[in-house]
Image (spheres, rainbow, N blue to C red):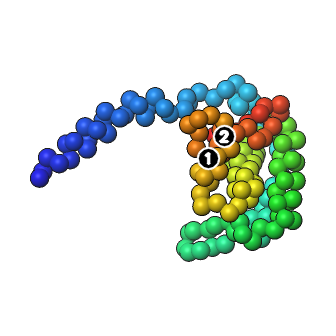
Amino acid sequence: MKRLWMPVVTVLWAMLPVVAFAAPDADLWPAWQTHDTSNEAEIDHSPWQTILDHHLIVVSSGVTKFDYAGAKSSSRKQISDYLAAMQSVEIDGYSREQQMAFWINLYNAQTVAVVLDHYPVDSIRGINISPGWFSVGPWDKKLLLVEGRSLSSE
């Protein structure tokens, strides 16, 4: 009975090269490294915060969910307007902190928009809009255009 862990460790060890091969490259593209440390301007994310304030529900301690069913057409319009505004931002000219907040908020808002566009769904993985035979979910679909770069939520 003591040797049952050996096959599991062997299988996991054998899979390590496959997992390492599938991992994204840690090197950033030069375009993603551009920033301006002297720019103290802040990007206005208050429209997104307003949406979150209206539709986030605390379901238990530390667990918050977005109320997709409660998001009305006005909220969908607000999200669309926020995404359009964010896509017009020249993000390369902002500080690293502002860029990080920008990318996190943009990703989250686009994810909510995709789910709302296909609501009701059991899982975001059930939204099959990505190109390719082996794609699962919406992450490979190019949905955003920032500084001339067509982006997916990948």
Q: Amino acid at mark 1?
A: Gly
Identified at 74% across, 59% down, the residue is 116
Q: Which mark is residue 137?
A: 1
> Is any atom of residue 56 visible in this view?
no
Identified at 63% across, 29% down, the residue is 28
Residue sitting at the far left: 1
Q: Amino acid at mark 2?
A: Ser
* Residue 139 percent across, percent down from the top left: 64, 43
* Residue 20 percent across, percent down from the top left: 44, 31
Residue sitting at the far top: 30
Tag 2 and tag 1, C-beta contact below 8 Å: yes
154 relative position to 143: left or right: left
Task: Tell me where residue 61 sits by quadrant.
Answer: bottom right
Label 2, label 1: how many angstroms apart (C-alpha)?
7 Å
Task: Tell me where residue 152 sits by quadrant.
Answer: top right
Task: Tell me where residue 150 sits by quadrant.
Answer: top right
- The residue that label 2 is drawn on is 130
